[in-house]
Image (cartoon, rainbow, N blue to C red):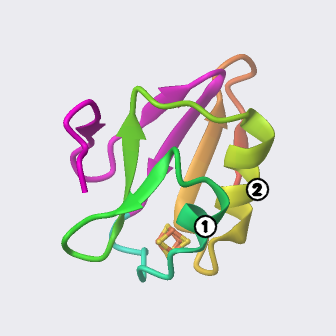
Amino acid sequence: MDDQNQTQTPQDKEVQIGKYKVKVIRSMCIGAGTCIAVSPNIFKLDEENKAIILEGNTDTEANILMAAQACPVRAVEIVDTETGQKVWPI
Ligand code: SF4
């Protein structure tokens, strides 16, 4: 796989995508891959079988939220930076 144009984030780093700040809680991630199935532009499994967020890519806010909601262990956190409110998990 060639990800030369994409920067992989360090652990639990928040990444701004549109108005959302998105973060994977790596200690919770079980590598189920559901987030990747929903939003492959944004999520990817690393060599530890944990989800990482691909910086510099984009997706619709609705699809990113759907990817977070699809995670069986609620390991994806989203904060709306316009309101300062946590959007998921709630
Ligand atoms: S869906 Fe959740 S558990 Fe599965 S890879 Fe994504 S963050 Fe990890």
Q: Do the residues labelled 2 and 1 touch (CB within 8 Å)?
A: no
User: Distance of mark 2 from mark 1, alpha carbons?
Assistant: 11 Å
Q: Give the label on residue 66, or none.
A: 2
Quarter the N terminus occupies: bottom left
Which segment did they paint magenta?
1-25
Q: Give the label on residue 84, or none.
A: none
Using the rendered view, name the quadrant where residue 73 is placed. Answer: bottom right
Question: Disc 2 marks which amino acid?
Answer: Met
- Taking the view exactly as shown, the residue that stands out farthest to the top is 82
Give the camera-side residue of 89 and 7: 7
Relative horizontal placement of residue 34, taking residue 82 as reference (left or right): left
- Give the residue number, with chain letter if any, for mark 1: 37
- Is disc 2 placed on a helix, strand or loop? helix
Relative horizontal placement of residue 73, taking residue 88 as reference (left or right): left
Mark before the other along the chain sequence, 2 or 1: 1
Q: Where is residue 70 in the image (x, y as percent from the top left)?
A: 71, 69
- Residue occupying the point 47% across, 31% down: 57
| The magenta stretch spans residue 43 | no
Give the camera-side residue of 10 and 46: 46
Using the rendered view, name the quadrant where residue 14 is placed. Answer: top left
- Residue occupying the point 25% across, 43% down: 3
Q: Position of residue 11 (x, y in %)?
A: 25, 53
- Residue occupying the point 74% across, 47% down: 63
Q: Where is residue 25 in the image (x, y as percent from the top left)?
A: 41, 61
Asked if one can make out residue 3 in the rendered structure from this viewpoint, the answer is: yes
- Residue occupying the point 54% across, 54% down: 40
Label 1: few (<14), some (14–19) or many (≥20) C-alpha neighbours in 10 Å:
few
